[in-house]
Amino acid sequence: MSHTLHRQGDEQSLSRDYTILAMPSSGLNSAGSLPKLAKALEIFLKYNPVNIGDSKGGSRFSLGSDDAVKKILVENELVHAVYRSEEQLIGVLKELKEADLGLSVTVGGLIKKIHGCCEKVNLKPHTIHMSLGVWGKTEKLPSKDVLEISTMCGHHLVSADLIVSLVEKVKSKKMTPEEAGKEMARCCICGIFNPARASEIIEKMAHAQ
């Protein structure tokens, strides 16, 4: 999976943005995978993620609660979570290793940070995907700040126009940065969007104008 691969930002901002997903292999171990996915989600929730979700059914914010996410899990799907610290991610990886669920696990974040987290729980990455950036007529892209937010939804369901409008609402005090972060998170149904980081960027953009 590469939909979490193209997140943008500086090192300080990205060092508080870690994604994880767990999934069975379709046709190989997908039959009977629902209890395993439920267990993976249980482990995810234990470490206080800022977002969770199912790849097709919805997220904490689109469905309204964590319990709603649990109820829509089905076989041969994948579950997501987003964390703000290495310590949280290390805890999750340690428990997933101990549970040995037989699911494929993909972690996203700064490569050095991810390697460090894996080393602390004696795990070696099977495969590494690295983004080479965006090429072409980049002058047609939205601003850098907008891209830092929109790229946190790998299916591009958080639009640039929405982000700009929310910045204006925060600037005029019609909405708090935290409310703006949650509003954007509702658009990203798979649960891989980081509303906490988004609210920080929105606040910075509002103050800069």
Image: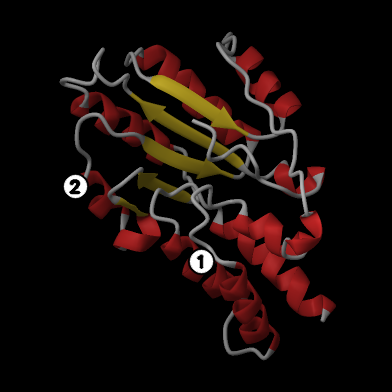
The kind of secondary structure element at disc 1 is helix
Quarter of the image where one finds residue 26: top left
Identified at 27% across, 49% down, the residue is: 57
Identified at 78% across, 54% down, the residue is: 137
The amino acid pointed to by label 2 is: Lys
Residue that carries the numbered disc 2 in the rendered image? 71
Q: Residues within 10 Å of mark 2 (few under 14, many from 20)?
A: few
Tell me the distance, in whole angstroms, between the alpha carbons under discs 2 and 1.
23 Å
Q: Residues within 10 Å of mark 1 (few under 14, many from 20)?
A: many
Question: Disc 2 or disc 1, which is closer to the eye?
Answer: 1
The amino acid pointed to by label 1 is: Met
Residue that carries the numbered disc 1 in the rendered image? 184
Residue 22 in the image, given as x and y percentages of width and height:
39, 28
Going from N to C along the chain, the mark reached first, 2 or 1, is 2
Please tell me the numbered disc located at residue 207.
none
Residue 11 in the image, given as x and y percentages of width and height:
80, 42
Identified at 52% across, 52% down, the residue is: 193
The kind of secondary structure element at disc 2 is helix
